[in-house]
């Protein structure tokens, strides 16, 4: 599929997606949202075939993503309430589609991740940030609020940080973002790609079905009382133990060899 506002390249089992509207710092409007949603659906299908086993999301130019396009949002004053709701639901579906991709999604953050850009970081499983990058749930500074991204942001940063950062709309450093769980690793800008490649190699050396199952397990278990989680976790491990992939991984360890899913050069 070809896109106007995105570029996507495939490097073996690694899908690299770049937001490509650098003139407006990769802000997203309804067209970008539609393209990102289509891309996520295609990626989900390719991931189900194990053609894609890791995704890296980046932004072209000096900034990862400045969030929702303010010009587009200001025009929505002329929409009916129904049109505004439809628009917001489309944005919600875009975030959910990326959030639920059954592979590891790695965010590459340089410059800034603000508003929906911080939301995009929140739906990544692993986030690597340039030490100079700025983050912010800046919506309240514009008189709006971080609504659509809130379930994804809250799952990462929790209520305590959200109370401060949603209410102030303040910009914060990569170090603070790491402290609250939005970022996993901070590097100098020149070392971003090397850090990401290291995470990619780690992911490719894990069993693809196991990765998908582990990713699905987290939201399924989170927030449940332990007694309710127990049958879910028992069923999850029981299914993996007897699966061909699980058996291959366990046998490979005992036989002191690499499992079949690790191809040459993909070891961590
Ligand atoms: N929506 C629409 N346009 C945006 C945008 C957004 N979210 N963010 C930046 N732009 C545009 C600017 O209006 C500017 O356009 P112009 O060249 O026509 O003047 C262009 O992108 C470059 O922005 P500029 O601020 O000059 O770039 P910068 O590199 O100095 O700073 C940011 C980058 C991201 C830090 C800064 O643009 C910013 O703070 N943006 C607002 C982010 C925000 O609050 N997003 C939440 C939206 S809900």
Image (cartoon, helix red, strand yellow):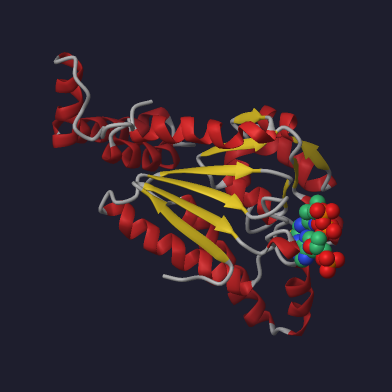
What residue appears at the point 69 percent right and 30 percent down from the top-left corner?
A: 188
Quadrant into which the N terminus falls: bottom left
The x, y position of residue 63, in whole percent, is: 71, 51
Left of 225 or right of it: where is 31? Answer: right
Q: Is residue 185 left or right of residue 42?
A: right
Q: Position of residue 51 (x, y in %)?
A: 29, 51
Q: Quadrant of residue 195?
A: top right
Q: Quick check: 133 left or right of 222?
A: right
Q: Looking at the image, which is closer to me, 101 or 162?
A: 101
Residue 5 in percent (x, y) is at 59, 68
Q: Quadrant of ligand 1?
A: bottom right
Q: How many marks?
A: 0
For residue 253, say whether it is visible: yes
Q: Position of residue 256 (x, y in %)?
A: 19, 14
Identify the image quadrant of the C terminus.
top left
Res 144 visible: no
Q: Nearer the viewer, residue 186 or 92?
A: 186
Q: Residue at x 18, y 35 (%)?
A: 245
Query: At x 73% / y 56%, what residue is drawn?
Result: 66
The residue nearer to you, when weighing 48 against 196, is: 196
Q: Compared with residue 119, is residue 233 higher up or lower down, i.e. above or below?
A: above
Q: Residue at x 53, y 44 (%)?
A: 124
Q: Nearer the viewer, residue 208 or 189?
A: 189
């Amino acid at each position: 599929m070809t896109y106007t506002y995105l570029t996507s390249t495939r490097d073996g089992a690694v899908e690299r997606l770049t937001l490509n509207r650098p003139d407006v710092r990769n802000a997203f409007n309804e067209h970008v949202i539609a393209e990102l949603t289509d891309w996520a659906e295609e990626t989900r299908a390719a991931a189900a075939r194990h053609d894609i086993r890791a995704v890296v999301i980046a932004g072209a130019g000096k900034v990862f993503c400045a969030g929702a396009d303010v010009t587009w949002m200001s025009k929505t004053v002329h929409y009916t309430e129904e049109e505004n709701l439809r628009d917001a639901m489309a944005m919600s579906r875009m975030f959910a589609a990326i959030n639920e991709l059954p592979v590891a999604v790695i965010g590459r953050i340089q410059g800034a991740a603000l508003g929906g850009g911080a939301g995009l970081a929140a739906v990544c499983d692993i986030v690597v940030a340039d030490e100079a990058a700025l983050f912010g749930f800046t919506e309240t500074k514009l008189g709006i609020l971080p609504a659509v991204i809130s379930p994804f942001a809250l799952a990462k940063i929790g209520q305590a940080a959200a109370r401060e950062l949603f209410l102030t709309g303040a910009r914060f450093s990569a170090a603070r973002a790491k402290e609250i769980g939005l970022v996993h690793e901070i590097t100098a800008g020149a070392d971003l790609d090397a850090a990401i490649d290291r995470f990619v190699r780690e992911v490719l050396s894990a069993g693809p079905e196991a990765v998908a199952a582990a990713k699905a397990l987290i939201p399924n278990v989170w927030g449940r009382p332990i007694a309710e989680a127990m049958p879910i976790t028992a069923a999850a491990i029981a299914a993996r133990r007897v699966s061909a992939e699980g058996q291959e991984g366990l046998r490979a360890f005992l036989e002191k060899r690499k499992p079949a899913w690790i191809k040459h050069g993909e070891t961590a």
